[in-house]
Amino acid sequence: MKEVFGYISHLLGFEKLSDYEKEYLHDANIRTSCYMGVIVCFLEIWMLLRQTRSKIIPKYQAGGDFFQLFVTYTSKYWLFLLIGMGIMLFCFYQRNAKLTKRQYRSLITVGSACVLYTSVLSLETFTKESDTITPVMANIMNAMLLSVYFFLFLIGVTIIAYAIFKYKKNKRVVLFEHLTMICFTLVCLAFGVFVSYSDFWGGKEIICFLTMVIYVGCLLIYRPFVTVLILGASFYAFYHVLLTYQNGLSFQYQEVIISGAAQKIISGDTVNYVTFFISLTTICFAIYHGRLNEAKKSKALEKSAQEDSLTGLHNYNYFSELAKQAVQGITENFSENVFLFIDVHNFKAFNDQRGFEAGNLFLIAIGKYISTVFADSLYARQADDHFVVLTKTAGLMEKLSELNDLVHHYDDEIMLTVNCGSYHLSNNQEDPRMAIDRARYAAHLIKNRFQTIYAEYDKTMSEEYHKRLYVVNNIDNAVKNGWIVPFYQPVVWSDTKELCGCEALARWMDPVYGQLYPSEFIPVLEEYRLIHKLDKSIFESVCKDIRAALDAGRPVVPVSLNFSRLDFELMDAVQELEDLVAKYAVPKDLIHVEVTESALTDNFLKLNEAMNRIKELGYSLWLDDFGSGYSSLNVLKDYQFDVIKIDMRFLSNLENSEKSRTLIDCIVKMANRINMLTLTEGVETKMQADFLNQIGCNRLQGYLFGKPLPKAELFARIDAKELQVSGKQI
Ligand code: C2E
Ligand code: MG
Ligand code: MG
């Protein structure tokens, strides 16, 4: 029983609709009203022209040329055109966050014109003598005309009220939109009844009435039970009007009935009326439910375009759109509005230790925390563990510390804290993406300083920020114009100190900033996922340099190339290298591939394959910066490296620290036991070099033997015999 009731109430449209569904149906209605407004205008004019040729109204027979008639008798119908325009404007502007002054004025003008015009026409209708037609007829026509004017008048008032309200309050005003639609419906129906009534009087068909009820019933979507009421009332009204006419017709005009249309009513075509009413109602039901389904589907689509699938927060694109509108709506005290970039110190460690699933749950929890703490603000997930917020400065620090507490207590063992950068607005034309980028930069500066949870972007950061932006925007130029060049740092055998290789280290020779060091461009290029462009360019330069040296008959040593973890994601790095090596005919044993330890802890499939391929293709594979990050000996177990490069941090305080010495000693021994050779980076003193030689570290690299040098200087040092090229290279 309950189900039956449920079904019936669903059928009749009594069910509760979501805001989205309501809005969807409503928007469709507003659009429809808009089109109908224009159609009605043209219909009106056409009707009028038709009537100017009618025999029925003697006044029309008086003649006059077409234009005269047109101007005289269409004057009031221009009103419809005006209304159409009003509704068009209305529809056009209703979506805007804020009306501009111009839009506001145009709406007010059109609305006022409607009000004035309808007032004047109503007055005229009141005072007009009913000259040519029966008194009953005249009254009915006047009443109808007046009701049409009244509704049009209402539309005018609505447009004005809407414009004022929206302009002042900057909000979408649903009530006014509903009012407009209702007015429009009534106007259409009244128009249909009126025109068909006069058609009927002239012995013609009642097409206009039917057209109008179809318009209202099928194009405008009301809930089914409302449609039944509206259509029922209109059919009844029309029927009633016709009968009244029938009875009130004076003898004098009976002859005018030509086709016997009136008889149809009398002779029982009522059944046809009812049938038509029922069919139309059924169609309306079907259309309503069809539209509702469309709304549901469209909601699902829209959701996926606006939502972050993991956390359910807005996604970054949608956030940027909303933030842009919000920013433009701010008119004063700009700096009280702040963009935040929030991520979590140590999220990566959490992910590594607790696993991917737990990482996802943590992200969902952060999303919830942010939506609770910044409930009245705009927020979204940008990507990874990055969240963005647009909020007010008042109470910001309290909110951040509340958020930090929540994040901090999420896991008892792993130290988790918030890392938040902020950027204060300076005007209402700022681009949210740029603002977030600056906030992100501020956050970036306190990365991994666990106790510091907040940094504000300020003027002093600006210069460095612009440099980063410059790098991102100019990487293509830099590659194209040859600003990226490899410098070569010597690598020597620890026993003979003879040159056994070089490491290619990128330098950016910039026309604006001068020489830039890797720390100024590598991290930012990695952050923006552009690093592969630089690396590809370095690989090519190195291959070219080797080729040139070989061609010139110079003694050549192997060069090690630094691969970023992202290279394997952003391009087919191994294939790129293969192609370049083939292009310049470089022997493979002259290229060493360096991959950092942190790159390999991510352990994704592509990386595994790439490492295996590098080995299969015959390149020597080196593990860079061993011991610099979260060392995982698994890396040594899972991959077969030829050489391990021990990070230079082990050398600091080597002279005084027994512990450091023991540690390096153990690493070297362990590496040897698993058939890997060792190289220590950052060797700066003779004592360090001697110690490393003594414990059996094979190769050394550091300022003691040479800083990274341009190719020409390296050759000069070799030529000057400051560096002896070793005959042994492996
Ligand atoms: P890395 O691969 O570990 O390179 C060694 C870094 O240590 C170089 O810094 C080098 O100049 C520096 N170094 C060498 N010996 C000494 C020394 O005795 N004392 C001190 N204090 N430093 C020494 P650089 O050239 O600034 O490069 C920094 C990092 O940037 C590199 O670390 C590497 O990870 C990255 N990098 C450099 N060039 C490239 C490149 O072409 N592609 C990629 N993906 N990364 C690169
Ligand atoms: Mg390296
Ligand atoms: Mg290194």
Image (cartoon, helix red, strand yellow):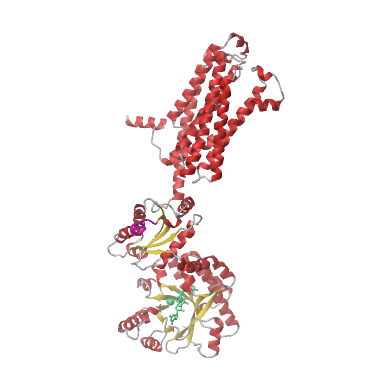
The answer to whether residue 180 is above or below residue 578 is: above
Q: Which image quarter is the N terminus in? A: top left
Q: Nearer the viewer, residue 476 or 100?
A: 100
Task: Indicate left or right for 702 with 260 as reference.
Answer: left
Q: Nearer the viewer, residue 694 or 334?
A: 334
Residue drawn at (62%, 14%) of the image:
258
Q: Residue furthest bottom?
A: 721
Q: Position of residue 539 (x, y in %)?
A: 53, 73
The answer to whether residue 11 is above or below residue 679 is: above
The answer to whether residue 393 is above or below residue 681 is: above
Which picture quadrant has residue 50? top right
Range shown magenta: 393-399
The answer to whether residue 366 is above or below residue 166 is: below
Residue drawn at (49%, 81%) of the image:
708
Q: Nearer the viewer, residue 370 or 357?
A: 370
Q: Residue furthest right?
A: 65
Q: Is residue 383 visible?
A: no
Q: Nearer the viewer, residue 330 or 477?
A: 330
Task: Indicate left or right for 246 with 454 as reference.
Answer: right
